[in-house]
Image (cartoon, helix red, strand yellow):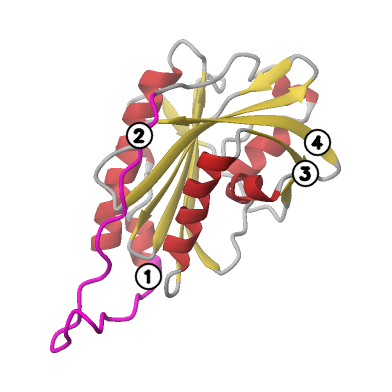
Amino acid sequence: MRTRIRHGLAAALTVSALSLVAACGGSGDAKDTKDKAGDKPAAGQTSAAPAPATPLTAAQMKAGILVLKDLPSGWKDTTAKPSTDVYKADKPECQPFADVMGDEIAGATRGASVDFTVGESESELSEEIVTFAGTGAADFTKKVGTALGSCTEFTVEIEGSKMKSSVKKITAPQGVEEAHAFTLSMEVAPGIKIEPSLVVARQGTGVLRFLHLADAATAKKDFDALAKLATDKFVKGAQS
C-alpha cells in the first residue's frame, strides 16, 4: 500500500493492497494545542499593524520534511508521485477530512512530500508540507479542528468507490503552533478496515500533513514518536 495519504487510501481499494493492511491502527486521548499569538509586528510597526503573513519558501519546506537518515534503521524511501484524485465526503462538516486525503488543497502551494515503509509495509508513514498566503494556513487547520468536534462518521467517495469512515480524536504532538491528530477508520471492503493516524499541524503559514499506518500492536508507540519527530523538524524548517 502506498504510504502517501492520497495514494495510500486509493491503493487500499485494490485487492493487492488489502493483504497489507488487514490489521492497522492507532489510538490516544483527545488533546489539542491552542493557537498561539499571530506574527510579530515588523520593525517600526505597532502591535495594531502586524506584518503580512509570508508563505514559506521552497527551501524552508524542504528543510522541514523528514529524510531517510532522520528515521530509525530499517526504513526505506517509497515516495510516490502526486495524484489528482479528489475525495468527497457525504457530509459538509466532514469535508475537511476528505481534503486532508487529497493531493491538492485549495489555495495552497505544495512543497516537499515523502513516503517511507519498514519491511513489507509493516509500518508506513507519509508526510507533505504546503504553504499558504495570508491566513490560509490558519483557516485550513481551524476547519480540521472544527470537523473534529462535529464529525464522527461519514462516507468518502474516490473515483466512484465509497468508503464508510469514522473519526477518533487522539493526542497531538506538542511544540508546534497548532496541531490536530486523529485516527480514521475506513472500511475498504466488507469487514476489512484500515486505521491510519494523522496529524495536521501549522507553523506560521505552513501546514504539515502526516500519516502513519502500522500493525495495531505497535501503532500507538510508533505514531507518537514519529509524529513528534516530524513536527519538530517541520517547526525548525519553518523557522529557518
Counting from the top left corner in percent of width and height, residue 134 is at: 42, 75
Q: For marks 3 and 2, give the CA distance.
A: 30 Å
Res 158 label: 3
- Please say if 134 is above or below 173: below
Res 57 label: 1
Magenta stretch: give its range: 29-58
Counting from the top left corner in percent of width and height, residue 136 is at: 47, 67
Hey, which quadrant is residue 53 in on the image? bottom left
Hey, which quadrant is residue 101 in on the image? top right
- Please say if 62 is above or below 233: below
Of mark 1 and mark 2, the one earlier in the sequence is 2
Q: For marks 3 and 1, give the CA distance.
A: 31 Å
**In the image, residue 124 lies in the stretch drawn in magenta:** no
Tell me the residue that label 2 is attached to: 31
Res 162 label: 4
Three-letter residue code for mark 2: Lys
Residue plotted at (42% across, 42% down)? 180
Q: For marks 3 and 4, give the CA distance.
A: 6 Å
State the quadrant of the C terminus: bottom left
Please state which of the two labelled residues, at mark 3 or mark 1, is closer to the viewer.
Answer: 3
